Image: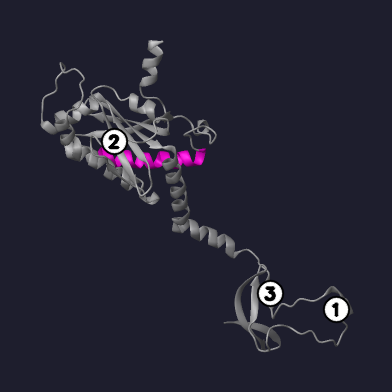
């Protein structure tokens, strides 16, 4: 039993999109999951670059797993010596949680304090002074996450240490496990996003994709449409008749229209009014001049 639990706690492959069904709490449909996955990859790449620049060390990052987890279970999974960072979302209500492993916290503190590595230190709670030292790292994470979520209009900021947490412990979070390769070791941190915020991000990203269609794609669509045929109608006016009056009509009868004489003629394309124009005679044919 212990062996299986240890294997499960390590990095797991990102599950296929088919496993994320809308009927499962905290999961997203296939298309939405792909968009949120892309947002998190964008954030992770930017955060790794910012971290490498700050620590002056080569750092690469990889998204290795994603799964729905209850908020309380995620909070309890943060090991001793690690740290749970809470990011408040604005302007919507919600919190994103970032869980740093004990190894990553120790590495960050050693790098920021220029301390030599030690194999004798046992895991312990992070002190307030150490949290103050790590504050710039936490702010960088919030900044890069906000930049990756820019299309959603949601921003994040780190909650002050010791602030009261009134969030429900059983809320379902979509947890992304991230692996950082730092020097000769690999460390883990995880980002837990509320399912509702993930859905908002996916829907907003989908609308951005539609709006920002590349120019060549638009040209291809327009070129294909130019070869199509449409029905164009010139309509003077509409009127309503009783069926009896219509059946009684004969050649020579006058039909009264609601539109005044000399009024513009409607130009309809595919049955929908698109333009107005004047009815004229051009050579030996009738024509419509668009206004």
The residue mark sitting in front, 2 or 3, is 2
Residue at position x 14%, y 33% from top? Answer: 112
User: Disc 3 on helix, strand or loop?
Assistant: strand
Q: Nearer the viewer, residue 249 or 26?
A: 26
User: Disc 1 on helix, strand or loop?
Assistant: helix
Mark 2 vs mark 3: which is more N-terminal?
Answer: 2
Could you tell me residue 207's position as x and y percent?
A: 47, 52
Neighbours of disc 3 within 10 Å: few (<14), some (14-19), many (20+): some
Residue at position x 74%, y 78% from top? Answer: 239
| Mark 1 and mark 3: Cα distance apart in space | 25 Å
Residue at position x 61%, y 82% from top? Answer: 277
Mark 2 vs mark 1: which is more N-terminal?
Answer: 2
User: Disc 2 on helix, strand or loop?
Assistant: loop
Could you tell me residue 144's position as x and y percent?
A: 29, 44
Residue pointed to by mark 2: 164
Residue pointed to by mark 1: 245
Kindly report the secondary structure that dominates the magenta region of the rendered protein: helix
Residue pointed to by mark 3: 233
Mark 1 vs mark 3: which is more N-terminal?
Answer: 3
Q: Which residues are magenta?
A: 29-49
Residue 183 seen from this side: no
Neighbours of disc 1 within 10 Å: few (<14), some (14-19), many (20+): few
Compared with 177, 233 (above or below) is below
Whether residue 71 sits left or right of residue 141 in the image: it is: right
Q: Quadrant of residue 60?
A: top left
Magenta stretch encompasses residue 112: no
């Amino acid at each position: 039993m212990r062996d299986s639990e240890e294997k499960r706690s390590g990095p797991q492959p990102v599950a296929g999109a088919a496993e994320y069904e809308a009927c499962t709490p905290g999961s997203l449909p296939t298309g939405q999951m792909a968009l949120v996955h892309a947002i998190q990859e964008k954030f992770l790449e930017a955060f790794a670059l910012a971290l490498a620049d700050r620590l002056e060390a080569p750092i690469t990052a990889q998204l290795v797993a994603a799964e729905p987890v209850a908020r309380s279970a995620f909070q309890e999974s943060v090991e001793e010596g690690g740290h749970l960072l809470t990011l408040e979302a604005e302007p919507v209500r919600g919190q994103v949680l970032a869980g740093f492993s004990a190894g990553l916290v120790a590495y960050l503190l050693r790098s920021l304090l220029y301390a030599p590595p030690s194999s004798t230190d046992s895991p312990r709670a992070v002190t307030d002074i150490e949290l103050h030292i790590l504050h710039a790292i936490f702010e960088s994470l919030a900044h890069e996450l906000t930049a990756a979520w820019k299309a959603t209009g949601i921003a994040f900021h780190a909650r002050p240490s010791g602030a009261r947490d009134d969030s429900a412990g059983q809320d379902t979070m979509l947890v992304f496990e991230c692996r950082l390769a730092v020097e000769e070791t690999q460390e883990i941190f995880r980002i837990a996003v509320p399912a509702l915020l993930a859905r908002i991000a996916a829907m907003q990203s989908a609308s951005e994709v539609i709006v920002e269609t590349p120019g060549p794609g638009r040209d291809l669509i327009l070129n294909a449409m130019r070869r199509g045929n449409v029905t164009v109608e010139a309509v003077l006016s509409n009127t309503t008749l009783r069926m009896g009056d219509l059946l009684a009509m004969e050649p020579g009868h006058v039909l009264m229209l609601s539109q005044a004489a000399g009024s513009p003629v409607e130009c309809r394309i595919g049955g929908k009014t698109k333009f107005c124009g004047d009815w004229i005679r051009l050579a030996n044919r009738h024509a419509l001049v668009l206004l």
